[in-house]
Image (cartoon, helix red, strand yellow):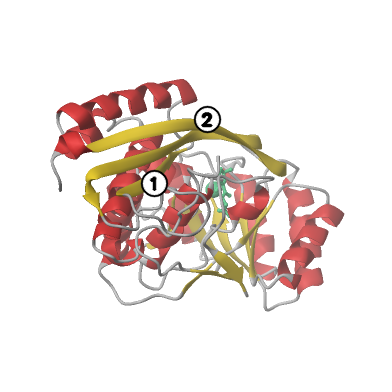
């Protein structure tokens, strides 16, 4: 690391509308507000830090990008996030990166932004793609991804699933839990009929169901070949999720909200999950999420990466995280297409149900600051 007085943090607010609202049992997400963060190391003129306009590299200091996009119920508020970024900026100047991270330890979105910017900067200095800096593993070309399908009528759900499959997705995650269980089963049945047996179907209830509702959904989902049921019961219901697993329905039980409430050890001690969903923004950064993933794997639970419907910087960070996890299943990383506009050009191509992992050094996101 260079001397701390050469490292400066800047941030800018942004607001991104979704192309159409994402209806979940936990509420509607229709826009994403947050902060784009840039770390600049003035002492480190690498000759290709991108500070100019457009894609052409221009001489300048090394830079690292981060993003803090709080989501109600999952992270700190937007105001608390901004105050935390301000503290991080000051601590970085006076004390250094480790102290800056410590000062935002409990504001997970702010910490995510700072940790990502530091990792991007360091991977850039080491001329290595971020996922290899994170995982030190082999080259990874692609990570499998799922399409994310909002709640809607059976006809709307079928239309969206068909469109996704036509665009190459072979895994669709359907939001359930807003309608009655019978209505959701009907939606899944109609989608299965429309897309055929080769497409993986998952459902995410965002804590909406009682044990009995989850049990009857599981019975039908077994016949419909649903692979994963995500967070059927409230986050607190560890025993309930363990009991659902004991039904041996053939449908894997995933915890998402439950991870934030209980942590890995309690989930594993209770045998409450086959799969655990990692949202780097809600966990405090891709570095934290990477450690959680390694611990889950050690304990025979499958980690799966998704976003909190983030801008291109955080989303690309999540793609690198997924690429650093060996044998990761399809991840919820195709969320850029839910946005009406983004922070900049997307370096991640979605192709045949996979995200093509950027192989440039660092995150591979280069034009987000200059274009705004
Ligand atoms: O996992 C995906 O396919 C995309 C991300 C996603 O579904 C979510 C993002 C943000 C908030 C939640 O409603 C939701 C989830 O619970 O997983
Ligand atoms: Mg979920």
Question: Mark 2: which secondary structure?
Answer: loop
Q: Which residue occupies 40% across, 38% down? A: 37
- Is 92 in front, or is 280? 92
Per the rendering, the mark at residue 232 is: none
Find disc 2 in the rendering and name its residue. Answer: 72
Which quadrant holds residue 109?
A: top left
Reading the chain from its start, which is encountered first: label 2 or label 1? Answer: 1
The C terminus lies in quadrant:
top right
Q: What is the tally of numbered marks visible in this picture? A: 2
Asked if residue 202 can be seen in this view, the reply is yes
**Discs 2/1, front:** 1
88 w.r.t. 42: above or below? above
Image coords of residue 224 (percent x, y): 70, 68
Indicate left or right for 263 with 96 as reference: right
Indicate left or right for 23 with 66 as reference: right
288 w.r.t. 70: above or below? below
- Is 174 in front, or is 241? 174
How far apart are labels 2 and 1 at the CA level? 23 Å
Residue density around tag 1, few if under 14, some if 14–19, many if 20 or more, within 10 Å:
many
23 w.r.t. 49: above or below? above
Question: Mark 1: which secondary structure?
Answer: strand
Which quadrant holds residue 173?
A: bottom right
Asked if residue 284 can be seen in this view, the reply is no
Find disc 1 in the rendering and name its residue. Answer: 65
Image coords of residue 143 (percent x, y): 48, 70
Which quadrant holds residue 190?
A: bottom right
- Is 7 in front, or is 13? 7
Q: Which residue occupies 78% across, 55% down? A: 157
Image coords of residue 364 (percent x, y): 43, 60
- Is 275 in front, or is 161? 161
Q: Which residue occupies 33% across, 37% down? A: 111
């Amino acid at each position: 690391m260079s001397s701390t007085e050469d490292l400066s943090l800047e941030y800018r607010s942004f607001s991104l509308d979704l192309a159409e609202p994402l209806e979940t049992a936990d509420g509607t997400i229709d826009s994403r507000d947050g902060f784009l963060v840039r770390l600049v190391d003035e002492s480190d003129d690498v000759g290709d830090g991108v500070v100019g306009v457009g894609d052409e590299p221009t001489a300048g200091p090394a830079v690292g990008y981060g993003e803090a996009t709080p989501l109600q119920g999952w992270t700190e508020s937007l105001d608390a996030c901004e105050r935390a970024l301000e503290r991080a900026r000051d601590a970085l100047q006076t004390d250094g990166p480790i102290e800056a991270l410590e000062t935002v330890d409990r504001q997970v979105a702010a910490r995510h932004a700072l940790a990502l910017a530091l990792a991007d900067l360091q991977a850039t200095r080491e001329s290595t793609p971020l996922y290899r800096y994170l995982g030190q593993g082999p080259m990874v070309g692609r990570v499998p991804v799922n399409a994310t399908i909002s709640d809607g009528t059976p006809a709307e759900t079928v239309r969206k699933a068909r469109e996704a499959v036509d665009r190459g997705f072979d895994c669709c995650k359907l939001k359930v839990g807003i309608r009655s269980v019978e209505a959701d089963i009907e939606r899944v049945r109609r989608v299965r009929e429309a897309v055929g047996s080769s497409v993986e179907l998952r459902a995410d209830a965002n804590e909406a169901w009682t044990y009995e509702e989850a049990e009857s959904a599981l019975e039908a989902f077994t016949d419909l070949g649903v692979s994963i049921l995500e967070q059927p019961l409230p986050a607190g219901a560890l025993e309930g999720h363990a009991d659902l697993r004991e039904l041996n329905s053939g449908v894997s039980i995933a915890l998402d909200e439950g991870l934030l409430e209980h942590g890995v050890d309690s989930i594993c001690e209770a045998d409450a999950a086959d799969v655990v969903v990692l949202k780097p923004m809600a966990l405090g950064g891709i570095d934290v999420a990477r450690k959680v993933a390694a611990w889950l794997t050690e304990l025979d639970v499958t980690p799966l990466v998704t976003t909190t419907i983030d801008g291109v910087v955080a989303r690309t960070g999540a793609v690198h995280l997924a690429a650093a996890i060996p044998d990761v299943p399809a991840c919820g990383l195709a969320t850029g297409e839910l946005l009406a506009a983004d922070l900049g050009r997307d370096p991640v191509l979605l192709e045949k149900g996979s995200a093509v992992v950027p192989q440039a050094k660092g995150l591979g996101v280069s034009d987000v600051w200059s274009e705004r």
